[in-house]
Image: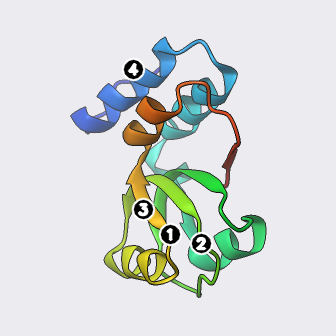
Amino acid sequence: MKKKDNQILQTLITELMKNKKPFWRKVAYELSRPRRKKVEVNLSKIEVYGAEDSTIVIPGKVLGSGMLSKKMTIAAFAFSESAKKLITAAGGKAISIENLHKSNPEGRDVMIVK
């Protein structure tokens, strides 16, 4: 794994790799990709693939393009301000991947969208 400039990101990747669950290792792998291949997902895509009251992980940044009408918990490394506003307006929660990892170390009932 290549050394990352962002120390917060590097720490998160290291913590996720310590967990032996394949789900969290997959998230760590996606976060460690090169900058030009970073994941950026719009809310419109989350709306299509996510279900009501589901938990979704975005191994990158959530962007605010599109509308969100379902109540979901969305975990990501970063959120745009407009994405955070739209998620909370729909009754959902925008949390960090680190917080989701602490509350759900098994990775159960969580879907990765990229």
Establish if 104 lies above or below 84: above
Name the residue: 61% across, 25% down: 106
Q: Give the residue number, with chain letter if any, for mark 2.
A: 71
Question: Which residue: 46% across, 40% down?
Answer: 100
Q: Give above or below for 95 relative to 92.
A: above
Amino acid type, mark 4: Thr
Foreground tag (2 vs 3): 2
Q: Secondary structure at mark 3?
A: strand
Mark 3–mark 1 contact, CB under 8 Å? yes
Residue wearing tag 4: 14
Residue picked out by circle 1:
92
Q: Which mark is nearer the camera, 3 or 1?
A: 1
Helix or strand or loop: what does disc 2 sit on?
Answer: loop
> Which residue in the structure is indicated by mark 3?
94
Name which residue lies at 25% across and 36% down: 8
Q: Is residue 40 above or below residue 77?
A: below
- Return the disc, 2 or 3, that comes first in the chain's sequence: 2
Dot 4 falls on a residue whose secondary structure is helix
**Residue type at tag 1:** Gly
Q: Give the label on residue 31, or none.
A: none
Q: Residue 102: x and y, percent?
A: 41, 30
Is 76 or 51 nearer to us in this picture?
51
